[in-house]
Amino acid sequence: MPAAVIPIRSHSRRASWVVLEVAQPGRKPVPYGILFADAETSKLTFRLHDLSLFEVLDETDFDVLTALSADIEEKGRDMGGLPLLDWLEDRASHFLRVTDRAGIGYFGSAQAAVDRLFDEHVDRAVRPYITHLPVYSLRAAATRFGELMENEEEAESWVRAPENLRVTNGMFVATVVGRSMEPLIPDGSQCIFRAPVTGSRKGRYLLIEKFDEADFASRYTVKRYAREGKLVESGEREAPIRLEPLNPEFEAFDLASDQYRVIAEFLQVLYSE
């Protein structure tokens, strides 16, 4: 039952989506999640609300909703996303319901498209550092979260955090460009970082600002902090640190203590193309 197409930026792919609703006895159905199936691959992507949406749930309904995410994931994997939407349209009509199917054109990450639909049709509230994280350019992140903490930069926008992430103050999202950290960080990925970086930095993936780079594209980099700097000579300065890429096509390099500052620690990729 195709409906209106909702464009999100210029698109290269198409998908079908529905709102999953929960209808408690004697109550108006409430939007609970977004189910999204790519038209070409039939891959299912989805996001569900948490149980805080409901003031009261009986034991049976609680059990159904508690198991729902795992059940949808399993059915989407076994059946495919489009057949799952067909199955739900045919069978979901009581406690769980779906709206009419809609078409969408989207570009980039399916999860990003799902999260935007979720924000529009399920939960419009932006709760900073609870459900959403701020988005910054790398330059703004360096100003806001760098060791000097120069200014209070305003976020460019707020993006919904992953369901499995324990969100804390100091986390933010920024886009990482380049292939040096592939396959962990694909070129152009939106990534989650956390500042400040405390404790030993060795072995951690860090967002670094290099002071000797005038070119913006080269000034900010994510690398593995491979070697701690240590005091040398009479304790007046530190030995260079060593930063390593993951992609073997790129070489490791050293930076002296006055050539860089640590902005934040990389936690995970949020969206990739």
Image (cartoon, rainbow, N blue to C red):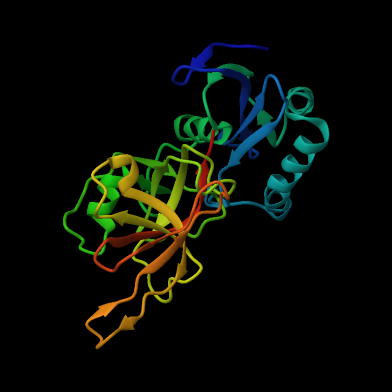
Instruction: Tell me which corner region of the image, top left, top right, bottom left or bottom right, holds residue 208.
Output: bottom left
On screen, residue 56 above or below 124: below
Spot occupied by residue 105 in the image (x, y as percentages of width and height): 54, 17
Left or right: 94, with 209 as reference point: right
Q: Kindly indicate the quadrant of the structure image that contains residue 41.
A: top right
**Residue farthest left in this picture:** 151
Instruction: Establish if 221 lies above or below 73.
Output: below
Which of 230/166 is in front? 230
Q: Looking at the image, which residue is at 21% across and 48% down?
A: 153
Residue 124 at x, y percent in the picture: 41, 36
x and y percentages locating residue 50 in the rendered image: 56, 49
Give whichever of 71, 167 is nearer the camera. 167
Image-based side of 102 in relation to 115, left or right? right
Q: Residue at x 53, y 38 (%)?
A: 272
Q: Quadrant of the N terminus?
A: top right
Comparing 85 with 56, the one in front is: 85
Please provide percent x and percent y for residue 247.
Answer: 56, 49
Let me know if residue 233 appears in the view. yes
Residue at the (68%, 46%) spot, across then down: 69
Q: Is residue 266 above or below residue 139?
A: below
- Rendered-image quadrant of the C terminus: top right
